[in-house]
């Protein structure tokens, strides 16, 4: 995984600006075929341009015109949303069914956009949450359980957004379900009677089923060993729809397992995906690219592999900076910028816990965004609050696999809710608490070549025995598992600090590795010779 490698963005696909025109005569014939009654009344309320858009949308799906669908999906739909539906929902699927000849496949795809718009712009009700889940079940059942591969092709961006939104709505429902307070009796009854809806098992089952059906794991393994992915694709995996849904499901599982707090399993999901590979499949969709590195970096951070987390965040932030002119064209511009801000916050945390020289541009951007917080992180009396604030801002919204026991009247009456975010914040802050004095300790060690244990303890205003413990902790934290090759979970123990030291006879001997790690190791091996030459005298302070 060569993070320093320059990013090649010449293969970025230019966004299509507008949808293809459609002749009015054809549209009029299809509109005249609409049913009468309530549906006809609903159609009258739909602007003519939206009717034309829906008809064009339907035709493109029938023809599997991926190029045209990309324009419709990324541009036309969002332009019409801004013009007509910025504060209200799109027409209900039942209201447009006659326009598309009651095509159930198209209506399922339309509902996916319909509910996503409600989640994005409005406030979903419990009925919306249930119906959206049922629609996803219909969509995935159609893809996974039809006789043979389905004749459907969609743009990669939409396929990624289907997986991404599916997980987002699962995450949103879990957090909604956990907040018992202020829910009506009807809502509690619905949640109690429909415990299988948005269950953790059903979501994981969908993602693993898409991976299995597409044989994407076997395809990636063959590609990793230098073969052709087609050799292992099979009947389903050879279709772009199944191949990309399977691939995006791997990234989806990386995200889900991070949300559930299993960071080791999250990285395990990426075993056959090579992050350093040029033109990797995840790089075809910018949002997928950013999501992949965000969760890889976050998982590393929670596993105390700060050096690897810093490399992951630095890599993707460099990519975002170099391609920001493209992001302004994307409807996901704000989401990418927000995720970038979160990663700068996580980077500030990691660099404080594991001091590392950053790329100049990344460092200047981080200082620009979090200069005040970065300064406070180095001060023990202010650092804890800032660590917590940055973590709460930048961490994913964790979920609990099981909701509250709504069968228990006491739980319902008290309205108690379990907040997974607070739980993982406490775990992270416990780690920070042990490390809070390390930046100050490091600043003193950089000033001296030798120093008495008691003297340094007095500077830090702690007891000498506490200092011994702190020094042991600093020594342990100065070596981490760092990725060299293989899967993301593999690595070698390496030094991550430019300072090395040893404690001998209540004297701390410091080596600043200006000429590399080998010099520090040589210094420590020959410390006794230095002491003999100097006659036990303390070396002069570099200060």
Image (cartoon, rainbow, N blue to C red):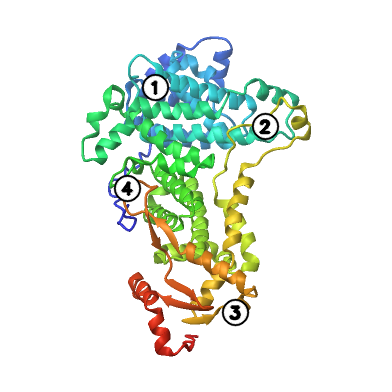
Q: How far apart, in angstroms, are the residues tagged by discs 1 and 4?
A: 58 Å
User: From the viewer's perspective, is residue 174 above or below residue 462?
Assistant: above
At x 41%, y 80%, the residue is: 528
Q: Residues within 10 Å of mark 2 (few under 14, many from 20)?
A: some
Residue at the spot of label 2: 404
Q: How far apart, in angstroms, are the residues tagged by discs 3 and 1?
A: 88 Å
Nearer the viewer's eye, disc 2 or disc 1?
A: 2
Decide which of tag 1 and tag 4 comes sooner along the chain.
1
Q: In the image, residue 331 lies at what x, y percent? A: 45, 42
Residue that protrudes farthest toward the top in the picture: 36
Decide which of tag 2 and tag 1 comes sooner along the chain.
1
Work out whether residue 304 or residue 150 is closer to the camera in this orientation and state it.
304
Q: In the image, residue 74 lies at what x, y percent? A: 42, 36
Work out whether residue 127 or residue 190 is closer to the camera in this orientation and state it.
190
Nearer the viewer's eye, disc 3 or disc 4?
A: 3
Residue at the spot of label 4: 486
Q: Confirm whether residue 462 shows in the render.
A: yes
Decide which of tag 3 and tag 4 comes sooner along the chain.
3
Residue 454 marker? 3
Q: Secondary structure at mark 3?
A: helix
Decide which of tag 3 and tag 1 comes sooner along the chain.
1
Residue at the spot of label 1: 24
């Amino acid at each position: 995984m060569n993070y320093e490698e320059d990013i090649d963005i010449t293969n970025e696909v230019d966004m299509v600006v507008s949808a293809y025109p459609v002749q009015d005569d054809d549209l009029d014939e299809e509109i005249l075929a609409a049913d009468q009654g309530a549906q006809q009344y609903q159609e009258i309320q739909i602007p003519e341009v939206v009717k034309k858009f829906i008809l064009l949308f339907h035709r493109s799906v029938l023809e599997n015109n991926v190029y045209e669908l990309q324009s419709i999906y990324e541009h036309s739909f969002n332009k019409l949303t801004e013009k007509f539906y910025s504060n209200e929902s799109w027409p209900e699927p039942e209201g447009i069914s006659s326009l598309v000849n009651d095509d159930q496949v198209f209506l399922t795809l339309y509902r996916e956009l319909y509910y996503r718009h409600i989640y994005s712009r409005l406030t979903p009700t419990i009925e919306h949450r249930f119906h959206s889940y049922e629609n996803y079940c219909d969509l995935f059942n159609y893809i996974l359980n039809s006789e043979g591969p389905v004749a459907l092709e969609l743009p990669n961006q939409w396929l990624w957004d289907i997986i991404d939104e599916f997980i987002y709505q699962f995450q949103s429902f879990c957090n909604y379900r956990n907040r018992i307070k202020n829910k009506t009796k009807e809502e509690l009854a619905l949640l109690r009677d429909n415990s299988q809806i948005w269950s953790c098992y059903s979501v994981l089952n969908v993602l693993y089923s898409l991976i299995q059906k597409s044989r994407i794991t076997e395809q990636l393994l063959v590609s990793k060993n230098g073969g052709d992915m087609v050799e292992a694709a099979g009947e389903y995996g050879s279709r772009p729809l199944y191949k990309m849904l399977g691939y995006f499901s791997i990234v989806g599982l990386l995200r889900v397992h991070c949300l559930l707090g299993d960071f080791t399993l999250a990285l395990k999901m990426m075993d056959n995906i090579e992050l350093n590979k040029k033109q990797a499949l995840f790089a075809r969709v910018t949002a997928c690219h950013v999501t992949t590195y965000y969760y890889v970096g976050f998982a590393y951070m929670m596993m105390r592999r700060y050096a690897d987390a810093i490399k992951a965040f630095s890599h993707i932030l460099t990519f975002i900076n170099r391609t920001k002119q493209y992001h302004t064209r994307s409807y996901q511009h704000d989401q990418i910028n927000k995720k970038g801000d979160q990663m700068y916050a996580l980077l500030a945390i990691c660099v404080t816990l594991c001091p590392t020289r950053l790329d100049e541009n990344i460092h200047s951007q981080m200082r620009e965004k979090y200069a005040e917080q970065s300064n406070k992180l180095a001060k023990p009396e202010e650092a804890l609050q800032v660590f917590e604030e940055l973590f709460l801002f930048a961490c994913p919204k964790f979920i609990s696999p099981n909701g509250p026991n709504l069968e228990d009247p006491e739980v319902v009456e008290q309205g108690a809710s379990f907040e997974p975010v607070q739980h993982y914040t406490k775990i992270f802050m416990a780690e920070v608490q042990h490390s809070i004095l390390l930046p100050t300790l490091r600043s003193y060690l950089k000033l001296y070549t030798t120093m008495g244990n008691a003297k340094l303890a007095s500077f830090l205003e702690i007891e000498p025995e506490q200092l011994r413990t702190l020094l042991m902790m600093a020594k342990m934290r100065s070596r981490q598992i760092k990725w060299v090759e293989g899967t993301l979970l593999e690595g070698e123990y390496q030094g991550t600090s430019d300072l090395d030291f040893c404690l001998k006879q209540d004297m701390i001997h410091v080596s600043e590795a200006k000429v590399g790690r080998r010099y520090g190791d040589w210094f420590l091996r020959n410390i006794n010779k230095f002491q003999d030459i100097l006659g036990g005298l303390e070396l002069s302070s570099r200060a």
